[in-house]
Image (spheres, helix red, strand yellow):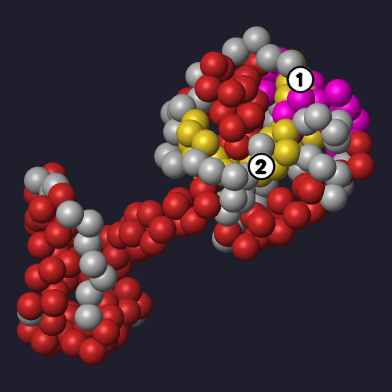
Amino acid sequence: MRFTVFGLGEAGSLIAAGLVAAGQDVRAYDPAGVPTPTGVERVDDPRVAVADAAVVLALTASADAPTALRQALDEIPAAAIYADLSTSAAIAKRQLAELAATRELAFADVALMSIVLGNGLRTPALTSGSGAAALEAVMAPLGMPIEAIGAQAGDAATRKLLRSVVIKGLAALLIEAMHAAEAAGFADETWQNLVDQFTVADGMFLRRMVEGTGQHAVRRLHEMEAAAELLTDLGVEPIMTRSTVENLRRVPTEGLPPLPR
């Protein structure tokens, strides 16, 4: 089976290398001067890259995803699966699916649900779209833990981005807090306290964080206003902390989201 990989950045190169290790024929195109994984056939023309491809995997930045599909759209075999692995909004994925449909290509919106570094082809993934089930049937036997979740392109992307609101937001909060802790001279103590808090975190911990906000919104608002003032005094712009303040101000009128039981 021939795979075409568009994009040999970190994720693309690791997944391409994993496909080679799984015994697959891999051809790739990337206009950037990036290394080519061992065993991957690198070509200089995207149209040549897709010749006889059974699966085209596009691992590009979201802004480059439409170009990646258009660059060889007319040459992609009609029976091929086109899989977009960019991190894009659902509407962008649906637009790609519509473009693929002009050639009657099976389209798969793929959301990588963990970091590729250290996982490669074994990175857990969700996929949706007209080609989702077919892509799962191809990739799962090769070692990718991939799950088809439906025929609507964008559903996989939506599930990933909803999680990203927390995961990437948490990273930003930690960065802001540690900048302030360093300025205050309490970096080690603050970090250890955070580690201790998250080490014991479970479902009930998360539920208490949300539901407790509804009960104590006013007190927490005052606390976070004080925290924003502290960060400013320490010379750290409280970007994330100000957002928390604004969120707490809205809780009394907007309420809390219902949590699953």
Q: Image quadrant of residue 58?
A: top right
Dot 2 corresponds to which residue?
A: 130
Characterize the local packing of mark 1: few (<14), some (14-19) or many (20 or more) Cα atoms within 10 angstroms: some
65 relative position to 150: left or right: right
Q: Which mark is residue 2?
A: 1
Residue plotted at (72% across, 33% down): 81
Q: Image quadrant of residue 44?
A: top right
Residue plotted at (67% across, 23% down): 37
Secondary structure of residue under mark 1: strand
The kind of residue tagged 2 is: Ser
- Magenta-highlighted residues: 37-56
Secondary structure of residue under mark 2: loop
Work out whether residue 134 or residue 189 is closer to the camera in this orientation and state it.
134
The kind of residue tagged 1 is: Arg
Residue plotted at (14% across, 64% down): 209
* Residue 55 horizontal/vertical position (percent): 73, 29
Query: Per the image, is 155 magenta?
Result: no
Residue sticking out furthest to the top: 23
Dominant SS in magenta: loop
* Residue 78 horizontal/vertical position (percent): 85, 33
The quarter in which the N terminus is drawn is top right
